[in-house]
Image (cartoon, rainbow, N blue to C red):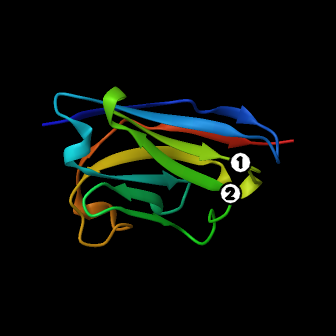
Amino acid sequence: QVQLVESGGGSVQPGDSLRLSCVASGDTLDYYAIGWFRQAPGKEREGVSYIRDSPKAMYYSDSVKGRFTISRDNAKNTVYLQMNDVKFGDTAVYYCAAGWPTAWNRASDYDYWGQGTQVIVSS
């Protein structure tokens, strides 16, 4: 069983950059596919990005494509989400999840979740 802890959230202005981290313990992260999700108040949890090592795959939602970059450092048991040119619509609690999903952006397909980190974009 793997435990996940997100960090790196905060309050930023539109156009700023932010890097979120998801650190795993209890198991090696490279065994899992990792998804980043976000949930804004009153909205459903939304898949943002996904990374898998074998076979290699990376996906992004249309809303963040070209602005966010997912990466992983297996030696550090960490997955990152680099957020560039953030927008008001990126305000949400961001979660990382681990598992072997059939659909990368379906939250119910993941087995393990972190507690989330808040990102607030305001001027």
Residue that extends furthest to the left in the rendered view of this protein: 1
Residue nearer the viewer, 106 or 83: 83
Is residue 32 shown above or below 21? below
* Element type at mark 1: loop
Residue that extends furthest to the right in the rendered view of this protein: 123
| Kind of residue sitting beneath label 2 | Arg
Is residue 85 shown above or below 18? below
User: Disc 1 designates what residue?
Assistant: 84
Give percent across and percent down for residue 96: 39, 45
| Kind of residue sitting beneath label 1 | Asn
What label sits on residue 113 in the rendered view? none
Q: Image quarter for residue 17? A: top right
User: Disc 2 designates what residue?
Assistant: 67
Q: Quadrant of the C terminus?
A: top right
Give percent across and percent down for residue 67: 68, 57
* Element type at mark 2: loop
Task: First in sequence, mark 2 or 1: give its number.
Answer: 2
Q: Residue sitting at 19 percent across and 46 percent down?
A: 31
Asked if the residues shown at circle 2 and circle 1 are in contact, with their CB atoms under 8 angstroms apart, the answer is yes
Q: Residue sitting at 76 percent across and 36 percent down?
A: 12
Give percent across and percent down for residue 8: 56, 30
Is residue 27 shown above or below 47? above
Residue 53 is left or right of residue 26, and the answer is right
Q: Residue sitting at 25 percent across and 59 percent down?
A: 54
Residue nearer the viewer, 43 or 78: 78
Q: Residue sitting at 45 percent across and 54 percent down?
A: 37
Give percent across and percent down for residue 59: 46, 66
Packing grade of label 2 (10 A; few <14, some 14-19, many >=20) is some
Residue nearer the viewer, 101 or 57: 57
Q: Quadrant of the N terminus?
A: top left
